[in-house]
Image (cartoon, rainbow, N blue to C red):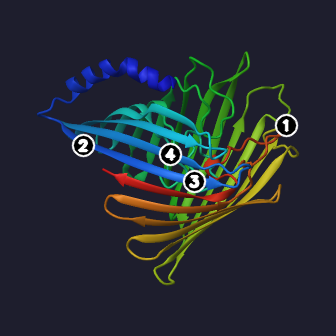
Amino acid sequence: MRRAVSFALAAPVLLLAVTALFPPPAAGADLRSQLSGWFSLNNAAPSTPRLGLRWQPSLSLDRSLGAGWKLDAEMTMAASVALDAPSWRCADAEGTLDPYRLWLRLSSRRFEARLGLQKINFGSATVFRPLMWFDRIDPRDPLQLTDGVTGLLLRYFFRGNTNLWLWGLYGNDEPKGWETLPTARRSPEFGGRFQAPFFSGEAAASAHFRRVADGTARTGESRFALDGKWDLGFGLWVEASLVHGGDSAEALPWQHALALGVDYTFPWGNGLYMMAEQFLVRSAPAVLGAGGNGASFSALLARYPLGLLDSLNAVFYYDWRNGQAYNFASWQRTTDRWQFHLMAFWNPRQSRLVPAQAGDPQVPEANTSFAGRGFQLMAVWNI
């Protein structure tokens, strides 16, 4: 709730700034909202039904400054309430109210500067993403929700689809992406990305630096990554990262991660889309050293449109080290303003892609909404 409190304190200042920057006669405004509700049931002992409701109002503003420049902003809140009934008798309710997006952007045809609470994500991989540095998007989530980060993002677009990203983050106290330890308080983070055409696709190099809060110690962390995606008649991508924890006393301070994937749409019926991805992650004592602990995962994703409104989806993960399978299937119907989802899952009860063990590479916890075996119904209304 820290963000919600900070937002409440800053609201009067924000309203004054919006009024000054976007006077009604000269600015365009777009007010939208999304209302979603869901019911889920799994095989926990005892079985645990869950009900949830989420309302996400969003206000977008834009103003032309002339000479090809534009100023725009987005303010989005997220209000949600969840109800759990572990024994089908006594229910536990929890509600939250938080800012979801809150940013201001100055842009032209080749340049943009975006400041505030925003989503920053990039990379070529789809399921297991070594470049999942600032978000935790679950490919099984119909709403594709993720927390944002607070900072400044600068992007410049050269001719020929080459682009340069620079960012600085501040005030993000909770772990994000692959992180298991938070960034040290009052400590800035910074990084960048350079992306350019490469053969029949694109390739990029990225880097990020921060200070980590580990108990009373503050240690540095460096991340480097390469990724690329190509169209060879089928899609092919690779994404690799190298992370150094910065603590010389740590036995396995280096982490290597690699994702390799392919996809293709088969001309069967309405078109069957298939995607396969292999993921390897390992902690090691040296940058090129052998040994250490590792894990290997495979993913298979399929999507088939039944018509203009309906589609079927399936996602399968397999953890080769632990011999665990994660299964997910869904039916989706989409109209102009409504979406309906029926989802079934058959997963380990401890929905964690890699158990937390000493020296293990750090892999984010899976979405607990899909833990165990069960189903979920969801309705989404876009207003």
C-alpha gap between disc 3 and disc 1: 33 Å
Q: Position of residue 210 (x, y in %)?
A: 62, 27
Residue 281 marker: none
Among the two numbered marks 1 and 4 on one chain, the one whose residue lies closer to the N terminus = 4
- Judge whether 338 appears above or below 307 on screen: above
Asked if residue 280 lies left or right of residue 1, the reply is right
Crowd band around label 3 with a 10 angstrom C-alpha radius: few (<14), some (14–19), many (20+) = many
Q: Where residue 123 appears, x then y in whole percent?
A: 55, 50
Find numbered disc 3 in the image and state the secondary structure of the residue it sits on. strand
Mark 1: secondary structure: loop
Q: Which mark lies nearer to you, 2 or 3? A: 3
**Do the CB atoms of the residues marked 1 and 2 lie less than 8 Å apart?**
no
Q: Is residue 186 above or below residue 250?
A: above
Callout 2: SS: strand
> What amino acid is found at the position of numbered circle 1 in the picture?
Ala
Location of mark 4 (residue): 52
Q: Residues within 10 Å of mark 4 (few under 14, many from 20)?
A: some
Cα–Cα span, label 1 and label 4? 35 Å
Judging by the rendered image, the residue that carries numbered circle 2 is 30
Q: Of the residues shown, which amino acid type is indicated by label 2?
A: Asp
Q: Residue at x 58, y 19 (%)?
A: 187
Q: Which residue is mark 3?
A: 40
Which residue in the structure is indicated by mark 1? 358
Which picture quadrant has residue 99?
top left
- Inter-mark Cα distance, 2 to 3: 33 Å
Q: Of the residues tagged 1 and 4, which is closer to the observer? A: 4
Amino acid type of the residue that numbered disc 4 sits on in the rendered structure: Gly
Using the rendered view, name the quadrant where residue 133 is placed: top right
Q: Position of residue 372 (x, y in %)?
A: 70, 54
**Pointer 3 or 4: first along the chain:** 3
Question: In 3D space, how far apart are the residues under numbered discs 1 and 2 (Cα atoms)?
Answer: 50 Å
Mark 3 or mark 1: whose residue is earlier in sequence: 3
